Image (tube, rainbow, N blue to C red):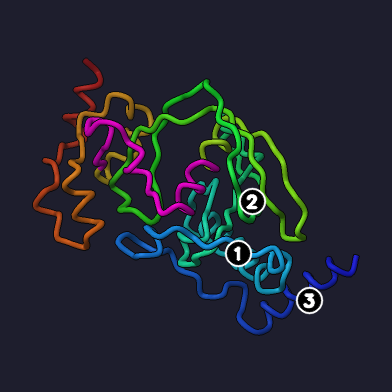
Amino acid sequence: MARHIQYLFIVLLAFFSHGWTDELQMAMVPDPVIFTRADEIHLSEISSDKTRKMIFDMKEYATHLREEKQFSLIGLSAPEVGIDKRIILIDTAYNGDEKKLGPLKAYINPQIIWYSNEIEEDKECCLCVDQHISGVIVRSKHIKIIAFDALGRTICEELSGMPARAFQHAVDHLEGICFPERVHGQHNLHWVDEELFALYQTHWKTWPISCSWSVWLAMKLDMPYYYLLPQSYPVDLLLNFYDQ
């Protein structure tokens, strides 16, 4: 009970001192924090006020992205918002069929201890990577994980479907790995112009516009890459392509 009162005090302190967010911002490639392995949180610090404040700020920022930016955010890692700690938020209740978002649950020092042999491919993108890049990635459909919660208690869970994919994506970020580095074959790394986003949602498996590895490498190195981009295709042309 005392711990819950302490957490409530932290929330109120954050509100009156800083407002509902602590000025977190999305770290964008090529920010070094994206490509650096995040630090573990020491056992003595897991349930500290500092760690709880980081989690609180991450949740508030995630809520901002969901409600004000209309992002269907299923997972968020600390490095994505410039924090080099091993903390992730995952919507474990996400219903893929209904596209219904649930609450985000915090995991501290998460580890994946088992990957199922059953795999599935799906499209992935990331808020810290140029929004036009998407990729088809094969991941395990089921995983078992261990972690700590904000009260220092051990979490042992089995996740499936989209929550499992989001967890794997977020843990990759803790290791300094971005999703394009999980893509196998350049034909599976895609460039999607903004006016084609809706079309891509239903035709990602056969998307004809690939993004070269040179573009991704240039982004990582903070070098110009626009001259390397693939040719743009009019929406009507692609619609005719898929109608055939």
Report the disc number at residue 183: none
Q: Picture quarter containing residue 204?
A: top left
User: What's the distance in space between the residues labelled 3 and 1, CA to CA?
Assistant: 16 Å
> Image height check: is 50 above or below 133?
below
Q: Nearer the viewer, residue 55 or 174?
A: 174
Q: Name the residue under label 1.
A: 60
The residue range painted magenta reads 167-192
Residue 229: x %, y % from top left? 14, 46
User: From this viewpoint, which residue is outermost toward the right?
Assistant: 1
| Residue 189 belongs to the span the image colors magenta | yes
Report the disc number at residue 104: 2
At label 3, the amino acid type is Phe
Tell me what residue is drawn at x 64 percent, y 52 percent. 107
Residue 36: x %, y % from top left? 40, 60
Q: Mark 3 points at which residue?
A: 9
> Image height check: is 120 above or below 23?
above
- Label 1 SS: helix
At label 2, the amino acid type is Leu
Q: Which callout, 2 or 3, points at the residue further toward the start of the chain?
A: 3
Q: Count of labels shown?
A: 3
User: What's the distance in space between the residues labelled 2 and 1, CA to CA?
Assistant: 10 Å
User: What's the distance in space between the residues labelled 2 and 3, CA to CA?
Assistant: 21 Å
At label 1, the amino acid type is Glu
Q: Which callout, 2 or 1, points at the residue further toward the start of the chain?
A: 1
